[in-house]
Image (cartoon, coloured by chain):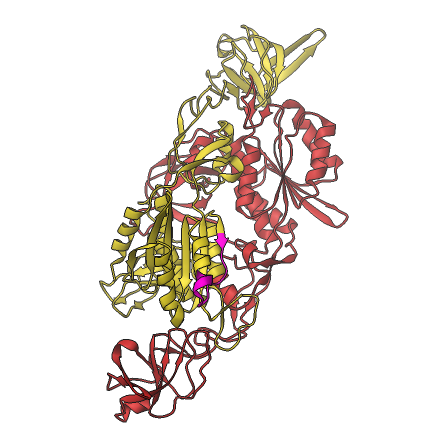
Chain colours: A red, B yellow
């Protein structure tokens, strides 16, 4: 049994970063950039008006000239055809390029149009204006060549706008690892069946699939492994074609011997087995390197909350390492809203619910929980509260680490 | 121009909750339950051992009988065939059902197996044991019929395990509204093209698509609307087949007149236009009710950050109302890490980055931002900071509301 920090170190020393691949804008959200991203253009690409109004020369106003000849109308998407000479103005719309000669914009509400036969003039109802008023200079936001995203940045939905603006329609991202999920146990029946005596439904399989999908990883859902060496070996061999193979369970008597034997026969080498954590102590981690392909193998305990905690602590750490982010902090500090007692000789991860009220402090409420088979408490939880071994009696307002689910 | 709270009220008064539909376990994550969910079984379904060891009668130990006849071996997935009579024990594995007669489990490490010819006995290396030790009672987690999720709960990946355990493979969820996205503007070119003079790339379209996809909504990506009444009318009519139609832009001179005309011609009624918010003032909201189908229509400003803010404030509020969650709180309190000055006469939503350090207080850092065309600041942001009109000069450690992106 090794400490959690040792397990993290072992995973980090074992797991290699993924290669990169190209992602389109419509497939990029949630992925991590494998390179910095630079702009291919100035933003804005030209001086532009930020108001509907008239593009003029400020010096005309300052010299008392307030009636100007309107030389053209410029809309967004059209390029100015004429220079704005002294005594002239151009009608201009929001977002349209500024014409040469003009150095500021008067909003339409501060003007009066004068249309006589054969002339188009405008009176500016201002006596003062500063250069640059109501316009935006070329490259005011950023310049061609500027870095706009750093390697390792995880693409958010709102980032897609910026990537589109700078024409980054094919971005290099870390290739998401493929995952195979292999629940084991003679006692398991599919979720859509009524369990017979001594049977339970397979909850780990669908849960592990959903948690991997939520991270954007493609999942191969394998059949339930039974106490049958040939069947189990076939499933394991298939699972080893993925980048990560997650087994859960294997607690029935036959499976207990069979899973390690099959893994060993298939060339998987153990890195660690058993971690000082509650729940989840029996977690197993190993890898196979064959024909240049690495597969990381996690054996998670069969109790569903143990499986869940093992996934959040260890599998996700491996995934972060594969994304080149081994040091990404995944926990936050929070304040307990209730006393809490721990028992036993292992650090505990306990279901918690964050309180989103009007306070600026993060608060977390421990949820009544019956142990590693009690998934109902997890349904009410949105995080795991870490209670280390240093003390057993926690009090309201004590600070703890929480790991968001 | 109406206050933000008025706009929220108008949306809430206009938008009706969606009907429900059935979701499978593999499509349920992110959706909101339209009904409470109850268990169809006890958890655990039977008394079970939580250790590998021997199921015994505590009274044998208390009466000094420490060598017991082993009557059978019970593994997970098998049902006990024999009653454990006084003086007897059953070998039992973790998760396996407890046999009749036995009332506690001794872990394997506290026993010694005695195998003589023709008999199988075990010595219990304990002098005391309490009833119920190392076993779990039927229904200790929850009982058949218990409510495990409430209507309105948003399904998390970790919830899939509990739904599978209780056989809820088809759950009633609010039907996600379909969304059509219609960017408009003669100045727009596709993100994969190099803009000509006076042109910019269409960033709002891909961004709005990504933000809707991230909420799990199916999106119909329409072509860019141009200053051409026939083309625009076709696009709007197609978009009105969805439950929500989001237009962005329409600031070029022709579009300014054309978009409202086409919407009116298509039977869309205005609910509000212009909200006291910066950026995003020109936001437009209306609806069409035709042949029993409602479509909610949002006209978002063309500047990309205005579009983004309009989406997060108003479209997301409409979506929450459609999911039966009009009062879901979407902001949190946080502490500013820097002074900040606001200008103008409208409440401002400013890009911010939350600081995830070792403090229990939520902290947020305002990001240098150049205004509604500056998407680069949004790339560095993970929230919007709300600066209301009450004051203009904010100081470090002031409390503010933040809206996570």
The one nearer the camera, A20 or A103, is: A103
Find residue A114 and report its image quarter: bottom left
The total number of labels drawn is 0
In this picture, is B315 found above or below B47? below
> In the rendering, at what x and y percent does residue A398 appear?
35, 44
In this picture, is A214 found above or below B100? below
Q: Is residue A298 left or right of residue A358?
A: right
Which quadrant is the N terminus of chain B positioned in?
Answer: bottom left
- Find out whether residue B229 is within the magenta segment: yes
The one nearer the camera, B46 or A394, is: B46
> In the rendering, at what x and y percent does residue A119 appear?
32, 88
> In the rendering, at what x and y percent does residue A403 appear?
46, 45
Which quadrant is the C terminus of chain B positioned in?
Answer: bottom left
Residue placed farthest to the left in the image? B390
In this picture, is B49 found above or below A177? above
Residue placed farthest to the front in the image? A117
The one nearer the camera, B230 or A316, is: B230
What residue sits 59% from the left and 25% below the top? A188
Find residue B208 and report its image quarter: bottom left
Find residue A24 and report its image quarter: bottom right
Residue B248 visible here:
yes
> In the rendering, at what x and y percent does residue A92 appear?
37, 78
What residue sits 55% from the left and 33% below the top? A204
Residue A159 visible here:
no
- Find out whether residue A149 is within the magenta segment: no
Q: Which residues are magenta?
A: B220-232
Q: Is residue B238 left or right of residue B391?
A: right
The one nearer the camera, A404 or A126, is: A126
Q: Is residue A234 left or right of residue B161?
A: right
């Amino acid at each position: 049994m090794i400490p959690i920090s040792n397990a993290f170190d072992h995973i980090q020393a074992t797991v290699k970063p993924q290669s990169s691949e190209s992602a389109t804008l419509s497939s990029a959200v949630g992925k991590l950039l494998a390179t910095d991203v630079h702009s291919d253009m100035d933003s804005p690409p030209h001086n532009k008006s930020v108001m509907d109004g008239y593009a003029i020369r400020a010096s005309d106003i300052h010299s008392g000239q307030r009636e100007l000849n309107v030389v053209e109308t410029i809309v967004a998407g059209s390029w100015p055809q004429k220079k704005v000479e002294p005594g002239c103005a151009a009608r201009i719309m929001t977002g349209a390029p500024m014409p040469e000669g003009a150095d500021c914009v008067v909003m339409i509400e501060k003007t009066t149009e004068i249309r006589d036969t054969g002339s188009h003039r405008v009176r500016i109802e201002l006596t003062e204006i500063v250069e640059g008023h109501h316009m935006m200079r070329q490259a005011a936001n950023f310049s061609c060549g500027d870095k706009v995203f750093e390697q390792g940045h995880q693409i958010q939905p709102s980032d897609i706008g910026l990537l589109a603006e700078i024409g980054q329609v094919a971005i290099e991202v870390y290739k998401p690892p493929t995952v195979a999920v292999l629940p084991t146990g003679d006692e398991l029946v599919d979720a859509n069946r009524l369990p017979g005596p001594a049977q339970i439904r397979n909850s780990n399989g669908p849960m592990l699939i959903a948690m991997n999908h939520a991270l954007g990883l493609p999942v191969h859902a394998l059949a339930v492994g039974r106490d049958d060496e040939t069947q189990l070996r076939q499933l394991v061999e298939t699972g080893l074609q993925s980048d990560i193979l997650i087994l859960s369970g294997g607690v029935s008597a036959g499976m207990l011997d069979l899973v390690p034997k099959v893994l060993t026969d298939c060339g998987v080498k153990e890195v660690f087995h058993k971690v000082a954590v509650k729940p989840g102590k029996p977690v197993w981690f190993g890898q196979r390197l064959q024909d240049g392909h690495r597969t990381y193998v996690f054996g998670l305990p069969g109790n569903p909350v143990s499986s869940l905690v093992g996934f959040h602590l260890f599998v996700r750490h491996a995934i972060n390492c594969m994304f080149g982010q081994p040091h990404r902090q995944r926990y936050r500090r929070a304040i307990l809203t209730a006393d809490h007692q721990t028992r036993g000789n292992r650090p505990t991860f306990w279901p918690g619910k964050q309180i989103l009220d009007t306070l600026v402090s993060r608060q977390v409420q421990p949820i009544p929980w019956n142990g590693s088979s009690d998934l109902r408490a997890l349904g009410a939880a949105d995080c795991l509260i870490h209670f280390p071994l240093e003390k057993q009696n926690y009090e309201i307002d004590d600070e703890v680490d929480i790991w968001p689910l």
